Image (tube, helix red, strand yellow):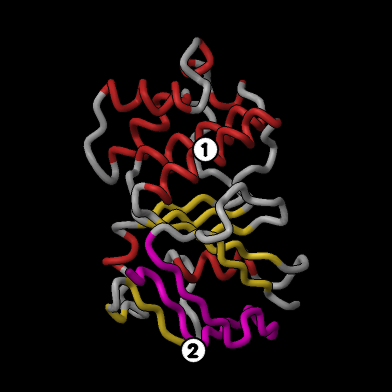
Amino acid sequence: MMLLEARNLHLWRGETHVLRGVSLAVQTGQCLQLTGPNGAGKSSLLRVLCGLLLPAEGQLFWRDLDCTRELGPLQRECAYLGHLSGHKAELSARENLAYLCGLRRRCSSNDLDAALEAVGLAGAAQHRPLRQLSAGQQRRVALARVQLQRSTIWLLDEPIANLDIQGQELFHRLLASHLKDGGCAVVATHQPLSVSESALVRLELQA
């Protein structure tokens, strides 16, 4: 089933033509990997797809519904992770998850426990202010948030940045499980993705 489709997207940032007629399509169980040199527009494309930027031209479809100017249907089923995780540094990992997840749905204490355990933060680290955690631990908290949102589509910008080998393996397990459960993903990364070739689609943007 086709979930997300973009047709002929154009985006300008000032006088810079960032996206030049970009089109893509993502089906159930698929992961679209975005690649391309710095400045090619990978992060901008993800921000367009999640509604943080509006394209100058082109159309976005979610479940065959044209949502180019009204992204509510897509945003309700979308989990976005950018370069910055959007967490509060003074709150603990658990408090951040409870607050951010609570904006979308009810999260029980058991939900939080399971999400933190899944990313390897089941111990005392989950109760420390986020500013006291390493960059890799903070990225794990961000992955826990993505998983907690139970969204159909994941839009991820360099999701394995700052993660060690174990953290990268963890991410790939979470991604594989998400795709197996009928979700889809758009991932901007230059790192190889441990996704079956039948589920992986690639799109290289040009600067």
Instruction: Name above or below for residue 68 compared with residue 27.
Output: below
Region rendered in magenta: 1-28
Residue 97 in percent (x, y) is at 39, 32
From the image, give the main secondary structure of the stretch colored magenta.
strand
Identify which residue is drawn at 51% across, 50% down.
81
Q: Residues within 10 Å of mark 2 (few under 14, many from 20)?
A: some
Residue 115 in percent (x, y) is at 40, 28
Identify which residue is drawn at 59% across, 54% down.
157
Looking at numbered disc 1 in the image, what kind of residue is underneath it?
Arg
Instruction: Name above or below for residue 204 compared with residue 187.
Output: below
Identify which residue is drawn at 76% across, 65% down.
38
Residue 120 in percent (x, y) is at 52, 22
Identify which residue is drawn at 61% across, 21% down.
132
Looking at numbered disc 2 in the image, what kind of residue is underneath it?
Glu
Of residues 80 and 177, which is closer to you in this image? 177
Identify the mark nearer the N-term, 1 or 2: 2
Number of marks in the rendered image: 2
- Asked if the residue under mark 2 is in contact with the one under mark 1, i.e. CB atoms within 8 Å, the reply is no
Q: Would you say 70 lies left or right of 92 here? A: left
User: Which of the 4 image quarters holds residue 14?
Assistant: bottom right
Residue 57 bears which disc, if any?
A: 2
Q: Secondary structure at mark 1?
A: helix
Magenta run includes residue 5 = yes
Question: What separation in Å lies between label 1 and label 2 (alpha carbons)?
Answer: 36 Å
Q: Secondary structure at mark 2?
A: strand
Residue 13 in percent (x, y) is at 63, 78
Q: Would you say 37 lies left or right of 175 here? A: right
Task: Identify the residue under disc 1.
Answer: 173
- Report the quarter where the C terminus lies: bottom right
